[in-house]
Amino acid sequence: MPATPPPDPRTALSRHPLEPAARSWLADAEARIAARPAAVRALFPAARRHCGRARLDDHWTADEAARAVLLTALPLTGAPLATELAGLFRHGDPAEQRAVLRALPLLDASTEAGGEPLADLALPLVREALRGNDSHVIEAALGPYGAARLPDSEYRQAVLKCVFQEIPLDRIAGLDTRADAELARMLADFAHERVAAGRDVPHDIWPVVRAHPARAALVERLTAETRAAVSERREAAVRALKELS
């Protein structure tokens, strides 16, 4: 499944120009990294201090875009690139981890054209991010790179984790093509559990459930819940059936 790279960070930075001192720092940092890749280890964490954290667009903040630019300046491919990324990720704070994850599809696309591709070599970082509880890092892990390369079972579990952590599903890459009958069944089970607890179901799971056979079975289960002794369950079931119809 091909990944769709995020918007070019350089374009985002050009539309919201950095201050002259920040532009100068970024250009110098790129040149230093191109000449000596290990320089990224000191320059990557410094990007926020020099470039700020202003929101540029739906995808990039100034520091994330600057960090992505620095990563694309690395004259590395394949395993050496993956090793450098792993070090930055594991020694970085959540903002630095997000920047690494958001840059992965850019780095994956750039190495396909020449040199050893990144391919699945950065998947351990995606998996590590998904094991954590920082919702912003999890969301970044499920960008185009992770969505394209995670095995089906891991992708489904990641989507379910997003639902539990109330991460909107429209922020997850690949859902329109990777949602399948098994994911719909898992989400239907989740919906039934919520109703049985007298709680409402997140609205964004319904499109996935409706598109697969799990819908019919869930309608039966929710209809049974409308006859529950507990009023909260009955009311939650009625609301869920209305959303599901």
Image (cartoon, rainbow, N blue to C red):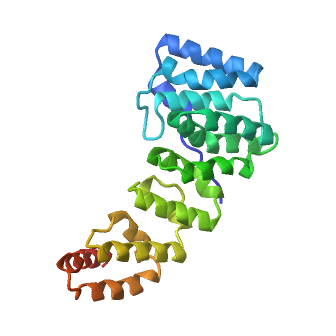
The front one of 230 and 31 is 230
Q: Position of residue 58 (x, y in %)?
A: 43, 41
Q: Is residue 21 above or below residue 207?
A: above
Q: Is residue 39 visible?
A: yes
Relative to 77, 223 lies left or right: left
Q: Is residue 216 above or below residue 7?
A: below
Q: Give the quadrant of the N terminus.
A: bottom right
The foreground one among 209 and 197 is 197
Whether residue 142 can be seen here: no
Specify whether 59 is left or right of 69: left
Q: Is residue 40 left or right of residue 224?
A: right
Residue 222 at x, y = what percent? 31, 83
Question: Which residue sits at x=50%, y=34%?
Answer: 95
Count the numbered circles shown: 0
The residue located at (51%, 72%) in the rendering is 183
- Residue at the spot 44% in from the left edge and 76% down from the top edge: 211
Task: Give coordinates of residue 189: x percent, y percent.
Answer: 42, 76
Report which quarter residue 70 is drawn in: top right
| Residue that lies at the very extreme toward the right in this rendered image | 115
Residue 4 pos. (x, y %)? 59, 50
Picture quarter with the C terminus: bottom left
Q: Residue at x 36, y 77 (%)?
A: 192
The correct choice, above or below, for 22 with respect to 207 in the image is above
